[in-house]
Each structure stands twice: as C-alpha cells, then as structure tokens.
C-alpha cells in the first residue's frame, strides 16, 4: 500500500536525530532517550527519511500513541511490517511471502481476525485463571532465587536468573519439556537479536536470512508439538492452540506456528528485560531498595516502574488505512507510523520527573504493554511473574550492587540488558 511522498511534507526530522532512531546501538547505549526528548519538544510528530528506508512518521507523545492505538481499524497492523525494516528487507520479505510476513502473529492482525484469534487464549491470561498457577510460578521463582544463594551472591543476573525464570514459566504453561528450554532461549535471542553481534544467528550475512532461518527452526520444533497435542490433547496451552478453531475451521499451520512463536518469545523475553532493568536500577539506587525491603507492599509498584523504565518493545509500526489527522498533522492513506513507546513512557506531560526511577510512582500510566485492542495479552502474567520473583529475591538479599559493567542488547525493536554482573549481601 503506497502512501504520500513523505519527503515532500514540511515536518522533517533532522538527519542527526534520524541517524539515532535508525542506529540499533543507540538503543543499547541510551542515546535514543536524548533523541526522544528532542523530538517530544521540537517535532513530536515528524517525518524520518533515512537513507535505505521508506519514509515514516515518528510518533513520540503519549497522547498521540494512545490515539493511534485506540483506532486499530484506521491504523492497521497487517498492511506492512510492524517492526522497522529497511526498504530492501521489506521488499525481500514481501517477495518471499507473497505480500505477507514470515509469521502471522496477533500483533500483525487486524479485525475481524484479531479479536477472534485473541479470544482463543484470552481466558488463560486473566488474573483469575493465573491464580491457579501462582504456586507453580512461586516454586520456579524459589528455584532461581536459590541460584543466587548458591552463587554466594555473585552472578550475572541476566544469564543466571532473568532469562531462565520467565522462560521456565512459559514452557510450563505451554506444556513443553524443560530439556527444550536452551533451544527456545537461543531462538528467542536470535529472533529479536538480528542487529546484535552477540545474539544474531551465526553464519548468516543479513538479517532477513537469519530471521527466516530462525522462523523455520521454530516451525520444525512446534510442528511436532502441534502433531502431538492434536493426537493427545491435554490441559496445557499448547493443546488450546493446536486444536483451535476459527469460524468452525481449524486454524492454519502458519497461524498455529505464529501463535506459538509469539508466546514462546514475547512471553519471556520482555519479562526478562523488565526484571533485569529493575534489578539494574536497584543496584544504582540503594535508597529504592531500602524502601522496597522496608515495605514489600511496594513491590507491585516497583514492577510497574521497572516495566516503564525498561519498555522492552521500543516501537511498533502502523499503517494508515485512510486519510486522517493526528496531532495537527495530515496523515494520508498508506503512511507508515512508528509508535515510540519508550518515548511515551518518558513523556513529561504524563510523568513527573520521567527520567527518575521511583518505585512509588503513582499513577503510572505507562504504555509498555501497548494500548487499546492490541494491549498485551500476557501483561498480567508478566507482572505476576515479576512480583513473585522479587518477593523471593528480596527475602534473601540485604543489599545489591553492580559487580562489573552491564550491557544492553543492540536492537531498535526489542531490547534490554544482556549482561548484568551483580554482587549481593545475602541474609
């Protein structure tokens, strides 16, 4: 779908700011937040025209992102990629898939498909249903808190706790054997890490080929899961997906694979990033840790602040389905828009002292889970996991600090800490 010639519109974003927006490393070293701050002040809804990319609107204000997100029939997810791609990568994927994508996940669907597919698993992720597995989650959290004790308080919080804990929870819900967790972790890191030299798939010269290979390997694994659950359904989430029907017809293999990949990747990667981001903040802000330990009732607020602070999904793209107006700008049918959630979550118009980490921040109207019809299906699970994990960890530690240099993943789409060496004083 073609939009207007955005380069001719009089709301250009300066080249130096565009260069930051399209530099994966800027999301790892935090330069992106300076760019967001400049955009919110000077050009909150402007045009980026980077070399090698199709032009796109950059939406940085909380209110504008909410407005777009509420109107999912006007600002669509299925017409073009929902993550920023170069024009070459976009064309290659379109040619390879006949105009579709490598997957057809919930985040890439529009009505009428989106509400139908969302309804398949929605009850699984309600607070009421999640209470039934809370004890399982706590047992898993205790096993990971034990790792901290066994280490003597010295560990890489990312690799030894933050990555494994939510992955174990998701695999338990899916009914997948723990022996497959290393493969799922590797594939998730490769899926989101095509721009990161430590996480990108080895032996591939470009991101599209690497991503295609990752999706194929996911497909090989989950096709066996689908076959098994169709032959022997059980009470796990994998059986719900494998045997799902839409309008009386079984869902396609692509739709089943896409559902599995979404839950298996987004279901743990974003939670691990938020958990590690929260721990990193506590390492640097001992007063916040003291407050938290003195009053464990603040843990849910800490969890929301850690999620706001980390905002693992940095953006989604939307495509205008009709001419409209947004934030005083004329948006034309076919225009591509980047919704910058991490900018919205530091918007001075919504958050007092937005660059401060405050565990008692209230209200905390962050958009890290999205907004509107595409609000993250797993938000309650993510917050439940993080609450339980930190309840268990905080019972065991009296203080925590960095024990080396932390590092962030290099990605403009989904990113978070990839190394976080910590040293704890244990009770």
Image: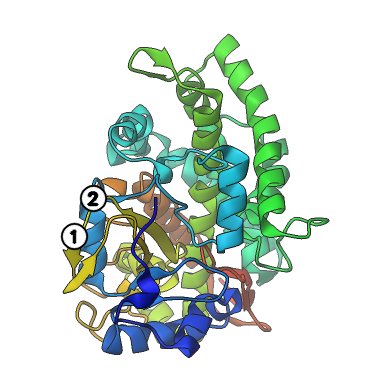
State how far apart marks 2 and 1 are (Cα).
9 Å
Q: How is the image coloured?
A: rainbow
Q: Report helix, strand or loop for mark 2.
A: loop
Of the numbered discs 2 and 1, the one sitting upstream in the chain is 2
Q: Which residue: 55% across, 80% down?
A: 26
Tell me, yes or no, whether the two marked residues, 2 and 1, touch with CB atoms within 8 Å.
yes
Residue 355 visible? The answer is no
Q: Percent position (x, y) of residue 37?
A: 35, 86
Where 172 falls versus 412 (above or below)?
Answer: above
Residue at position x 47%, y 79% in the image: 281
- Residues 381 and 103: in front is 103
Q: Which residue is mark 1?
A: 324
Which residue is pictured at 71% across the width and 51% down the height?
Answer: 209
Q: Which mark is residue 74?
A: 2
Pick the residue in front: 105 or 292: 105
Q: Position of residue 248 (x, y in %)?
A: 35, 12
Label 1 crowding class (10 Å Cα cut-off): few <14, some 14-19, many 20+? few
Of 340 and 172, the residue lying toward us:
340
Residue 59 appears at what percent x and percent y?
32, 71
């Amino acid at each position: 779908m073609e939009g207007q010639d955005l380069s001719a519109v009089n709301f250009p974003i300066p080249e130096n700011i565009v260069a930051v927006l399209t530099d994966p490393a800027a999301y790892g070293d935090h330069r992106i937040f300076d760019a967001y701050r400049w955009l919110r002040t000077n050009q909150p809804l402007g045009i980026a025209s980077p070399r090698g990319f199709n032009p796109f609107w950059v939406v940085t204000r909380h209110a504008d992102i909410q407005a777009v997100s509420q109107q999912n029939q006007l600002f669509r997810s299925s017409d073009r990629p929902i993550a920023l791609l170069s024009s070459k990568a976009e064309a290659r994927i379109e040619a390879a898939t006949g105009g579709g994508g490598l997957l057809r996940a919930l985040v890439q669907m529009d009505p009428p498909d989106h509400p139908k597919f969302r309804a398949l698993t929605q009850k699984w992720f309600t607070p009421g249903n999640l209470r039934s597995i809370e004890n399982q989650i706590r047992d898993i959290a205790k096993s990971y808190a034990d790792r901290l004790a066994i280490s003597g308080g010295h560990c890489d919080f990312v690799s030894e706790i933050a990555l494994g804990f939510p992955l174990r929870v998701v695999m338990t819900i899916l009914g997948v054997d723990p022996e497959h967790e290393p493969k799922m972790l590797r594939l998730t890191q490769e899926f989101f890490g095509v721009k990161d030299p430590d996480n990108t798939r080895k032996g591939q010269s470009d991101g599209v080929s690497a991503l295609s290979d990752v999706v194929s390997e996911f497909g090989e694994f989950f096709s066996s899961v689908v076959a098994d659950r169709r032959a022997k359904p059980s009470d796990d989430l994998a059986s719900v997906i494998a045997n799902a029907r839409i309008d009386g017809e079984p869902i396609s293999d692509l739709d089943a694979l896409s559902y599995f990949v979404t839950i298996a990747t987004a279901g743990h990667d974003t939670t691990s990033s938020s958990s590690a981001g929260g721990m990193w903040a506590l390492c640097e802000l001992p007063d916040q840790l003291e407050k938290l330990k003195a009053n464990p009732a603040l843990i849910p607020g800490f969890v929301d602040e850690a999620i706001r602070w980390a905002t693992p999904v940095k953006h989604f793209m939307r495509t205008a389905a009709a001419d409209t107006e947004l934030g005083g700008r004329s948006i034309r049918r076919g225009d591509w828009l980047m919704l910058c959630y991490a900018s919205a979550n530091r918007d001075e118009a919504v958050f007092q002292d937005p660059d401060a980490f405050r565990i008692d921040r209230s209200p905390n109207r962050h958009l890290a889970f999205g907004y509107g019809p595409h609000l993250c299906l797993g938000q309650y699970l993510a917050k439940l996991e993080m609450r339980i994990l930190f309840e268990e960890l905080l019972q065991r530690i009296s203080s925590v600090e960095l024990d080396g240099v932390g590092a962030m993943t290099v990605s403009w789409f989904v990113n978070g800490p990839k190394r976080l060496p910590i040293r704890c004083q244990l009770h």
